[in-house]
Image (spheres, rainbow, N blue to C red):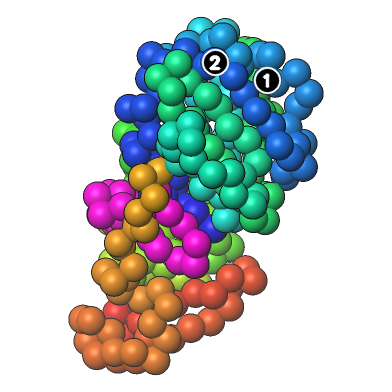
Amino acid sequence: MPELPEVETTRRGIAGHLTDRRIEQVIVRDRRLRWPIPKGLEASLAGQTITRLARRAKYLLMLTTGGSAIMHLGMSGRLRIVRPDAVVQKHDHYDIRLDSGDILRFNDPRRFGCLLWSADDPANHPLLATLGPEPLSEAFTGRYLHALSRGRKIPIKQHLMNSRIVVGVGNIYASEALFMAGIHPKRAAGRIALARMETLTQSIKAVLEDSIRVGGTTLRDFYGGDGQPGYFRPELQVYGRNGKPCAKCQTPIRQIILGQRSTFYCLECQH
């Protein structure tokens, strides 16, 4: 499913088409997403002016003069800008028509995405209120991660993937960051010293920034807002490389299942 870099890539791809535009009409073709699109959302959004498109974790927040639309891509969703004459495709679940003539269209074959409405501060919405800090923010530091890991026996990889600890460090990027930091994914979070946590947080930031820079990771069916796939996958050092030589020491990369997720690491480089 799209992870933080893919969602950020989508945000950057469509934000310029949305900011300061007035919403003329909302067309909902199928309300049956992960959470049903609320009845009345069309009326709530129509007539609003979009002030900004923000991101919180993997959620996109369309901030308007009267409230906020909370959007999620789910496992296979795509948000793209299309012209008014664009043919409606199967799984095109909703359109947001703008005063520019452009349409923001959402396609989601698996229907795990969402479109919700918040008349209040979206940060207080139940889906967002308990989330941890953004990994690229100044709040996410080695000292913060170290403090929250004390006494924890959970493997560090699973600790990183807890959205109450930090948001957006999904399976791919957790594996890559741990390799960059030289930390074994099964090492107990509470046994990692502060200095190594500092290295790990910097590695997480570097991996995510690199991925955003090149447009996200193409796995299966992710496409950015401009319809172009991400290009980070060829740069992956361990994820999906089971049995292939480590780029640093040539030891074959190993694959294990950790927390029901495939995990990749180098036995020699990560301790």
Q: Earlier in the sequence, mark 1 or mark 2?
A: 2
> Where is residue 184 drawn, in percent x and y?
41, 73
* Residue type, numbered disc 2: Glu
Disc 1 or disc 2, which is closer to the eye?
2
Query: Is residue 222 magenta-colored?
Result: yes
Residue drawn at 54 percent across, 66 percent down: 155
Disc 1 marks which residue?
A: 42
- Residue 36 visible in the picture: yes
Which residues make up the magenta segment? Answer: 202-224
Is residue 2 shown above or below 178?
A: above
Residue drawn at 52 percent across, 16 percent down: 23
> Where is residue 249 drawn, in percent x and y?
22, 87
Q: Which of 131 and 151 is in front in this view?
A: 131
> Where is residue 2 drawn, in percent x and y?
49, 54
Residue drawn at 74 percent across, 40 percent down: 30
The span from disc 1 to disc 2 (Cα, nearest Å) is: 10 Å
